[in-house]
Image: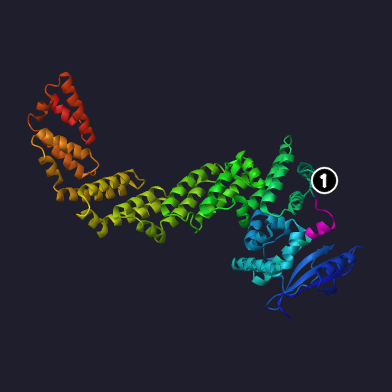
Amino acid sequence: MSSGKVHYEIYIKPPKGKWQFCGALESRDKALKQAAELAGGGASVQVMKETLTEDGVYLSVRIFQEGDTSSPRPKSGKEEAEESLPCFKPQDLYSYESRKTIVRLLQDSLNRWKITSLELLHSPTNLERLESTGTVLQAAIQKIAIAQSQAGEGTIGERVKTLHKLVSDAMVSVYVDRNKNRLPTLQKKTIAELATQLATDTRRDYLFNAAITAHLEDCEDWDSKLERILELIKDVPADNQLIRDYCLNIIDGYVSEILTAPSAIKDIVGDQNDLGGVLQRLIELASGQIKEEDIASPGIAALNLHFGAGALPDARTAIIRRVLNDLKGPKRILQDSLGAEVKFLRRLGSKVAMASGNLIPSDEVLAAFRARSERLIAPSTLDAYLGEAENPAARVERVLYISDNIVGEANKRKLAGILQAMLESVEFNQFFSSSDVAVSKRLALLHELQDKVLQSELEDTRKQVISERLDTICFGIAESARLFDKVANSHNDPLAKCMALLKLAASNLLTRGKTRDNAQRMALGYIREPGVLKKHLGDGAGAESAAKIEELTAMLRDAGVDPQSVMARHAA
């Protein structure tokens, strides 16, 4: 007999008798019809779907139940191990954590059918469709059984049996409710009326969700589902807070699952060129900030309005978490250069922070951006970006730019280490010692780099070390070119020499540190020579002297010299 072969076994139990095998059929419909005919008069009936696996073992799933819920199969072997396992109930499958597991295990099927886990669990039609796949359900149960067994919850075989019974009981419960017309609908009731009717029902959530699932059953795509479920909000009462909160909470849950469905992404964001476009659209939607003229689908238009009004917090949280999860993933945000991606990431960060508000902890948001930042500075990505720079100075600028726009102290420290290594490299030093590049250009580049370092978000100690290294290179160039002597010797009198050196110190050619200090020291040396300052300023009286004092004060200040340290000598 080939694996995957399916048949249906019918069992019947008289009111005071034992379970008896009644027959086996290959047709599901015929088996269910015969079971329905046998039910009644106090007799219990069950139909078991039997699927033959590759290892020759039959896996059983109960698809019909009427009356006694005990197993029609004789129990074999000892039961101690199974009884020691945690107790599970079919209702446990409806919990949030269980639904997350269902989505993970059945993602391909859910995407293909365009349904959520809520729609799967509350729809007899969807459950029958899952059941008819055979191997899909079997594989999902086996994966969970293996994981639970590895966690010490019994053998794989024991877990498979337990989980099969759990799933089977849950399915049968839904089938029985359908067959007995227990599943409500919204065809003749508003959502508020149904919520009120079920207010005291112990199965309120299950029945309410079944009604909404049926309401969405004929929707062909995700957007139409969003549109239809959001239309229900207009019937939510404003004068009954308990009913209002309950209805909105259920709707919020459905919308959340729709928005996290992988196959729903295109319906939600439309055609986008890259992941960056997707993330931007999602975060704008979470804030309700998509422009009306940019929305083509009615479902998203309605969702944008509700989000803009601050409604449906769980759904907004779901979108933001989807953005954060994509940020932590490996896919590039933009196909452009790393610089463009970093710039985009910074803008996106501001939008995510605003959208998150009190929905998601700031630590969770930062963790996602730290993870993305770590990917951005991976050697394979960073080396390609730096390789596009025209010279070593430009490469240093790019590292500084990346450093200022990424998140995470560890990431910034890593870049600071890369930066220090670049400044010590042969290539960097050869570039700044090359006569092929004009002295003035080399000095200006070093001055600009130092400014960017000092204004960067690097650690203070790193800033100091890197700044001093740039200053050392700058001083070496100035000394090699005899820059200070040439500037001073181009004038005859001490005052002119001082003024020229002050202008040099104030220019964008000298780095802060010993290079600029040397120009300041030489300038002060000349102006402090006996009689130079007095000759220039006179007795300080009159408009001409006042103008000269103002001019000299400004030059000293621009050159980084405290004017009082010079003017005090004149006043004395």
Which residue position holds label 1? 188
Residue 411 picture location, percent across and down: 40, 53
- In front: 493, or 28? 493
Crowding around mark 1 (Cα neighbors within 10 Å: few <14, some 14 to 19, many 20+) is: few
Q: Which residues are magenta?
A: 174-184
Q: Confirm whether residue 222 shows in the render.
A: yes
Q: Is residue 158 above or below residue 349?
A: below
Indicate left or right for 267 with 91 as reference.
left
Q: Residue at x 64, y 63 (%)?
A: 108
Indicate left or right for 231 with 27 as reference.
left
Residue 202 picture location, percent across and down: 77, 49
Q: Residue at x 49, y 54 (%)?
A: 333
Residue at the extreme bottom: 1
Tell me, yes or no, whether the highlighted magenta stretch contains residue 14.
Answer: no
Residue at the extreme right: 41
Which image quadrant is residue 512 in?
A: top left
- In front: 30, or 537? 537
Residue 381 picture location, percent across and down: 41, 59
Which corner quadrant holds the N terminus?
bottom right
